[in-house]
Amino acid sequence: MDTLSIAPCGINCATCLAYLRDKNTCSGCWSDNATKRKYCTTCAIKNYIFLSETESQLCCECAKFPCAWIKHIDKRYRAKYNLSLIDNLQQIKSIGLRKFLESESEKWRCSSCGGTICVHRGFCLGCKSANLRGKVNPSVSQ
């Protein structure tokens, strides 16, 4: 995980299904990867004009944070994946991007094989384990 793996909205691209899968992989929000889904390349949040005025180009630095777009995607991620993007962005703002990435790397590491747990599937795509930091991911319905 590196600084380019954090999308403006607070999603950690390194935990995304499209980033982790073996076929038609995506290189993350900041890449020019032609295999990205159309909704990723046309994302209203990433292409928001005021983000270019921030140093990090993350929503947490925007004067309108949290805007309606962030609230909408945060609500969906909370319901579907037990993850708050607003919390991610607030944590980045309070502890910095590097420390956030360190905590993310530990948080999403599969305790069975050391791979990465997929936020969208709730398990490691490598070994199929749902062990998130030694605990079963609560967002996974078996």
Image (cartoon, rainbow, N blue to C red):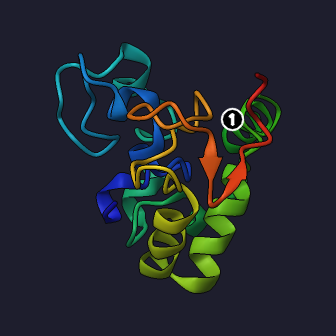
The residue furthest front is 112
Residue at 40 percent across and 38 percent down: it is 47
Within the image, what quadrant is residue 92 found in?
A: bottom right
State left or right for residue 34 relative to residue 43.
left
Seen from the viewer's position, the closer of residues 27 and 139 is 139
Please tell me whether mark 1 sits on a helix, a strand or a loop.
helix
Q: Which quarter shows the N terminus?
A: bottom left
Q: Nearer the viewer, residue 33 or 141?
A: 141
Q: Residue 76: image x %, image y %?
A: 75, 30
Does residue 117 appear left or right of residue 79 in this picture? left
Residue 79 in picture, x, y percent from top left: 82, 32
Residue flagged by tag 1: what amino acid is it? Ile
For image coordinates 78% across by 24% down, the residue present is 141
Observer able to see residue 63: no
- Quarter of the figure with residue 98: bottom left
Q: Quadrant of the C terminus?
A: top right
- Per the image, the residue denoted by label 1 is 73
